[in-house]
């Protein structure tokens, strides 16, 4: 008899109070967490690219933890013939395999993994119990690893969603995290990872490649990198504990412009962002630079909260399910910078993904901000994280699309900036042509107080 086939719901129970943000230690917007009894409530996130972290392979995606409801065990009615080969194989292995003892649990896990992989979707995958546990721990914002987000692309440089790495699907660095071992070792956005510890990536899934890169603090990994089509070279990186500081603020142009950089979208980051922005507004600041470059995303609730500080009403984004039904997520009331006299410029690049694109897309569609920089990554699907019973791990599954307020689907396309600015590969670290252009739009001096 087949295992239960749980139905899943992404609708929170309105009778439950908001839980604290998982792992953040701070109260956050209504979002659900894993319950001690194994039941799971939905939590919505928009995690971007794969984070190369010791316990986590966090994909560029919005996701939610699936809720388990009443289940009917057994082969689905009318599908007995379809499932007959599955059971024939299972029983043949269980009863006749002579190569050693058979672990039924491993067979079940392998079957689940095969079903998910058969979708050919790099953002849907099975995780073993340990991988699932470590991934949930990684959502807290503290990681062990090299501290980089990666994605996949084609040889022509376009974003690719592929299930297997090879000549037509390359593993690429979207962005190293601030202060991370990857950044210190010289990893740059756009670097193609050709080998890991001398081994080719051909035929691996993205998850398998990530598992080779991640690891505990103090251990090393050697990445063979191809940069801008040049000759491959090796970078050896010592893994470490990485704690992300997601909101960075300062005054620019002699105090004429408030600058806020957001490097991630945890609920705690959203709360901190509101505090910083509110302080700027109280101080009379009317020109704001919102820097989303290299931001791999995070919680959808955080994206909504941050966008709502500038957008007074209307959709922040739409979500479209497998049936084609669309539901709008509206702006939260009470934003601190919705006054149109407060001018906003948002900076994006190829490392801006998922939750970053939700915010940037909302600001662009509502004409609340001017987007400056490079085309964003292009991730427009939502994943649901589903734990499984009997210590079988869990899986993530693409269950929806998200669209901008004007119902644009930017998957594999990205957001085109209103003011494109190309950044040459040899740009010195102390120069920032994208920020310079943003300040010019405000009529401010580009170079003043950048290091303040």
Image (tube, rainbow, N blue to C red):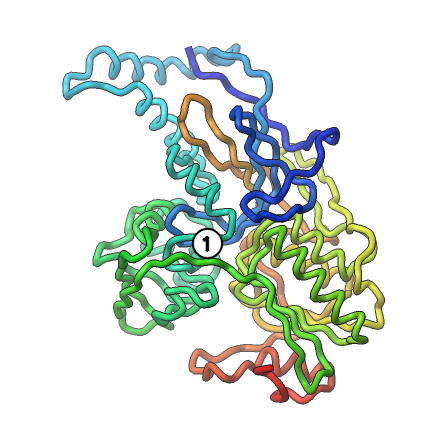
Q: Quadrant of the C terminus?
A: bottom right
Displayed quadrant of residue 334: bottom right
Q: Is 10 on the left or on the right of 167, as rendered?
A: right
Label 1: which residue? 160
Q: Residue at x 33, y 47 (%)?
A: 211
Q: Residue at x 31, y 74 (%)?
A: 230
Q: Residue at x 64, y 36 (%)?
A: 321
Q: Quadrant of the N terminus?
A: top left
Residue 281 in percent (x, y) is at 79, 70
Q: Nearer the viewer, residue 97 or 26?
A: 26
Q: Nearer the viewer, residue 437 or 182?
A: 182
Q: Is 70 on the left or on the right of 148, as rendered?
A: right
Above or below residue 367? Residue 334 is above
Above or below residue 75? Residue 206 is below
Q: Residue at x 61, y 83 (%)?
A: 436
| SS class, disc 1 | loop
């Amino acid at each position: 008899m087949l295992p239960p086939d749980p139905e899943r719901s992404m609708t929170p129970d309105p009778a439950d109070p908001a839980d604290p943000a998982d792992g953040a230690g701070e109260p956050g917007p209504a979002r659900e967490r894993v319950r001690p009894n194994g039941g799971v409530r939905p939590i919505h996130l928009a995690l971007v690219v794969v984070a190369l972290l010791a316990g986590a392979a966090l994909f560029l995606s919005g996701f939610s933890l699936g809720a388990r409801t009443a289940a009917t065990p057994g082969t689905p009615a009318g599908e007995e013939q379809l499932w007959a080969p599955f059971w024939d194989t299972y029983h043949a292995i269980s009863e006749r395999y002579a190569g050693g003892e058979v672990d039924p649990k491993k067979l079940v896990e392998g079957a689940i993994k095969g079903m998910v992989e058969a979708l050919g979707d790099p953002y849907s995958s099975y995780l073993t119990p340990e991988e699932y546990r470590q991934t949930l721990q990684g959502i807290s914002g503290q990681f062990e690893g090299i501290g980089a987000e990666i994605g996949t692309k084609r040889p022509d440089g376009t974003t690719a969603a592929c299930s297997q790495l090879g000549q037509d699907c390359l593993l690429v660095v979207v962005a190293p995290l601030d202060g991370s071992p990857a950044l210190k070792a010289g990893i740059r956005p756009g670097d193609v990872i050709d080998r890991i510890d001398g081994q080719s990536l051909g035929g691996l899934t993205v998850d398998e490649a990530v598992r080779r890169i991640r690891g505990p603090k103090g251990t090393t990994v050697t990445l063979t990198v191809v940069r801008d089509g040049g000759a491959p070279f090796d970078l050896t990186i010592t893994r470490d504990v990485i704690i992300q500081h997601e909101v960075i603020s300062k005054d620019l142009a002699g105090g004429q412009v408030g600058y806020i950089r957001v490097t991630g979208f945890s609920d705690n980051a959203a709360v901190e962002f509101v505090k910083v922005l509110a302080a700027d507004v109280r101080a009379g600041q009317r020109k704001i630079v919102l820097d989303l470059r290299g931001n791999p995303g995070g919680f959808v609730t955080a994206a909504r909260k941050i966008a709502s500080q500038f957008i007074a009403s209307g959709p922040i984004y739409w979500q479209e399910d497998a049936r084609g039904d669309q539901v709008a997520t509206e702006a939260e009331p009470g934003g601190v910078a919705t006054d149109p006299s407060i001018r906003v410029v948002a900076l994006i690049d190829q490392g801006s993904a998922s939750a970053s694109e939700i915010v940037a897309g909302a600001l662009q569609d509502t004409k609340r901000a001017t987007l400056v920089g490079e085309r964003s990554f292009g991730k427009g699907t939502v994943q649901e994280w589903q734990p499984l019973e009997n210590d079988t791990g869990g899986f993530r599954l693409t269950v929806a699309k998200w669209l901008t307020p004007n119902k644009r689907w930017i998957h594999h396309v990205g957001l085109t900036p209103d003011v494109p600015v190309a950044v040459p590969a040899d740009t010195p670290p102390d120069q920032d042509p994208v920020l310079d252009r943003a300040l010019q739009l405000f009529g401010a001096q580009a170079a003043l107080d950048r290091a303040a």
